[in-house]
Image (tube, rainbow, N blue to C red):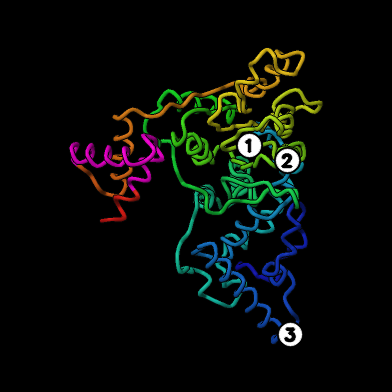
């Protein structure tokens, strides 16, 4: 017997009752009594589906796609339970049964055409202006492609929550910390750089990747300090990690030096996302003698009263090995402080708390030219070895020496004059 839309009872939802607040599902669950009111509400619901489809780049059966989008972007009891648990621990049997029950209620909306519930056939196979599927959306489509039974949908969604989370945690690779609202703000236009785009520094990448893979796998891992010559790709390497291990639950949180005093509050926020791993990224970090923020960082790394969350590590980049500016006066025995060694120990103790310190040096000529060649090749340009050497070295001598940044600036100049 064909399914009658009037038999749908969304008020029977248990763990996903937040869906009842959605305007589209609210109309489907409680259709207006009069024909005129029904048409108006149905049109508003269809307009909502089209609006989201155009904004998110959705196509196909819009009602099915929309419900899956709600299940992976709105906070629900199930999604929160997965997020707050360890990656190895699934939700309890009772909550799983409630989730399967809800998906049984939602199954007609997921399996039948959209026009079965809203009188607009264009919703059945919609083509957006542009498809914009990101990695998480593509993974959701793949996970649910062969799902037709409630238990199969439940398995697919639980796998998605475990890998990507829900809401902003699933949508963004990197975040900034907003002290005013005490929440994470997703960075929409995050650089898409990968580790394969970084030429040279094989040993440094090996150390960085090894530590990060241990961290993502839930094994012991160190806080990391990348230190050395300017423009050598230290920051790019850290940001590339968020792209490489996004599907494995790694997220990047950009933190400014002035925000270090709010580290305890940030740590508590991140602690709630136990199934994810977070790198707190402090870029170009250094302190003056009279800066007090470094004491907050020391306490956060180790030594505070409250234990650091297991799902958080701090990665910092700096041009200074010891992070805190030193002068020759600091090393003179006749300085004012009575216990000079204590002062020196205080100065260097911060960098010592990073378990892994990776040194970056300025590239030699071969690596410098290889970086330029790689960047140009990505743009479809290949210079002869002689052209590359002449042009690259001429630019180096006229600018600030050899570095990845100098190479990038040369490539921009070369492409701009073509």
Instruction: Please give the name of the residue rendered at 21% of the width and 43% of the height, measured from the top-left corner.
Output: 383
Q: Are marks 1 and 2 in contact (CB under 8 Å)?
A: yes
**Count of numbered marks:** 3
Mark 3, residue position: 34
- To which quarter of the image does residue 161 belong? top right
Question: Residue 346 in the image: x percent, y percent?
Answer: 70, 20
Q: Name the side, left or right, on which 126 lies relative to 217.
A: left
* Magenta segment main secondary structure: helix
Earlier sequence position, callout 1 versus callout 2: 2
- Disc sitting over residue 190 in the figure: none
Question: Residue 151 in the image: x percent, y percent?
Answer: 63, 46
- To which quarter of the image does residue 365 belong? top left
Of marks 3 and 1, the one in the foreground: 1
Q: Name the side, left or right, on which 195 lies relative to 311.
A: left
Q: Secondary structure at mark 1?
A: strand
In the rendered structure, does residue 94 fall within the stretch colored magenta?
A: no
Mark 2, residue position: 266
Q: What's the distance in space between the residues labelled 2 and 3, CA to CA?
A: 51 Å
Q: Is residue 219 visible?
A: no
Earlier sequence position, callout 3 versus callout 1: 3
Mark 1, residue position: 280
Front one among 366 and 400:
400
């Amino acid at each position: 017997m064909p399914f009658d839309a009037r038999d749908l009872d969304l008020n029977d939802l248990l763990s996903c009752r937040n869906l009842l607040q959605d305007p589209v599902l609210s109309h489907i669950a409680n259709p207006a009594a009069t024909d005129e009111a029904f048409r108006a509400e149905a049109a508003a619901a269809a307009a909502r589906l089209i609006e989201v489809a155009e904004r998110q780049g959705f196509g196909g059966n819009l009602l099915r796609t929309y419900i899956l989008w709600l299940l992976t972007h709105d906070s629900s009891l199930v999604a929160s339970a997965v997020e707050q648990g360890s990656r190895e621990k699934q939700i309890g049997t009772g909550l799983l049964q409630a989730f399967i029950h809800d998906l049984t209620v939602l199954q007609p909306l997921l399996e039948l055409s959209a026009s079965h519930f809203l009188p607009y056939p264009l919703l059945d196979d919609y083509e957006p202006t542009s498809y914009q599927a990101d990695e998480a959306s593509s993974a959701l489509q793949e996970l649910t492609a062969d799902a037709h039974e409630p238990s199969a949908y439940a398995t697919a969604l639980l796998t998605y929550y475990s890998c990507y989370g829900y809401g902003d945690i699933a949508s963004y690779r990197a975040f900034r910390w907003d002290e005013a609202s005490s929440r994470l703000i997703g960075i929409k236009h995050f650089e898409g750089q990968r580790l394969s785009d970084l030429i040279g520094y094989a040993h440094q990448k090996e150390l960085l990747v090894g530590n990060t893979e241990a961290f993502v796998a839930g094994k012991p891992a160190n806080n990391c300090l990348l230190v050395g010559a300017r423009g050598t790709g230290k920051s790019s390497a850290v940001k590339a990690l968020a792209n490489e291990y996004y599907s494995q639950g790694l997220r990047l949180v950009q933190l400014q030096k002035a925000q270090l005093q709010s580290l305890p509050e940030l740590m508590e926020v991140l602690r709630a996302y136990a199934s994810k791993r977070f790198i707190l990224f402090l870029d170009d970090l250094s302190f003056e003698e009279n800066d007090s923020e470094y004491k907050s960082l020391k306490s956060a790394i180790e030594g505070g009263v409250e234990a650091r969350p297991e799902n958080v590590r701090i990665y910092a980049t700096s041009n200074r090995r010891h992070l805190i500016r030193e002068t020759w006066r600091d090393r003179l025995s006749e300085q004012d402080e009575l216990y000079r060694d204590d002062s020196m120990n205080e100065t260097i103790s911060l960098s010592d708390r990073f378990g892994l310190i990776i040194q970056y040096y300025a590239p030699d000529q071969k690596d410098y030219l290889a970086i330029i060649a790689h960047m140009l090749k990505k743009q479809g340009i290949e210079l002869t070895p002689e052209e590359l050497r002449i042009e690259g070295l001429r630019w180096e001598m006229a600018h600030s020496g050899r570095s990845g940044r100098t190479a990038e600036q040369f490539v921009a100049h070369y492409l701009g004059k073509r």
